[in-house]
Image (cartoon, rainbow, N blue to C red):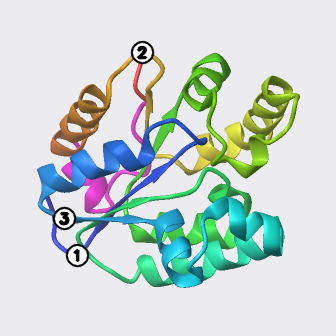
Amino acid sequence: MPKGRNLCLIGFMATGKTTVGRLLARSLGWRLQDSDREIESITGLSIPAVFAYYGESYFRFLETRVLERLVEGEHQVIATGGGIVLSAVNRALLKRAGPVVWLKATSETILLRTQGLHDRPLLETPARKERVEKLLAERQELYRSLSDFEVDTSRLGPQEVAEKIMAWLEMSDELWEGKVNKLAPDA
C-alpha cells in the first residue's frame, strides 16, 4: 500500500463503518479514526446529546471541522457518520484524503440492525421505516458519486466485508497512485 494515504468509509448508519474500519485498520497497521467518536471526545457528549442540545446543523458544523483535521493525517482508516456526504465541502475533503469505500445495506437490514437502539437521533421517530427510506433516497446518489468502491453489507459479516475491501485495495494500487478515477463497484 502506498505511504501517506488514508482510506475513507462512507455509508448510511448501521452499515458497519466503525466495525469494518477497526478490522481494516488492524490489517493495514493503520489507525482507525471515527468522526463520530471524535465529535463525542471534543464535546464530551454523545451524538444523541449533541443533536438534542445543539441540533443537527451544529452537529454538521462539528463534523466538517473534525473531518478537516482528520484528512490531514496519514495511514488512517476514517469511518464517517452517515450524513457526512451531505456537505460539498466534506465530499471534497474525503476525495482528497484517499480512496472512498461505500458500505451500503438495504433499508430492511438497517432497520433490523438499529431495532431497539436509541443512539441514532435521526431515527427517533415512530415512522422509522419511512425515515430510513427517505434518508437513503436522499443520500444514495451522493454515496455513489463519491465512492471508488462499494460493498453491500446486508448479507455479509464484518470480516467478509473487510476482506473484500482488502482484496480490492491489493488489486487497485493504480487507484491509490491516482492513475484510475473509478473502478467497477462490487457486484
- Horizontally, residue 125 falls left or right of residue 13, namely right
Numbered range of the magenta stretch: 172-184
**Distance from Cα at disc 2 to Cα at disc 1:** 33 Å
The front one of 100 and 14 is 14
Earlier sequence position, callout 1 versus callout 3 = 1
Q: Nearer the viewer, mark 1 or mark 3?
A: 3
92 in magenta: no
Q: Which residue is mark 1?
A: 4
Q: Amino acid at mark 1?
A: Gly
Q: Residue at x 63, y 63 (%)?
A: 47
User: In which image quadrant can residue 97 be found?
Assistant: bottom left
Q: Is residue 108 above or below residue 168?
A: above
Local SS, label 1: loop
Local SS, label 2: loop
Local SS, label 3: loop
Earlier sequence position, callout 2 versus callout 1 = 1
- Residue 136 rendering spot, x and y as whole percentages: 73, 35
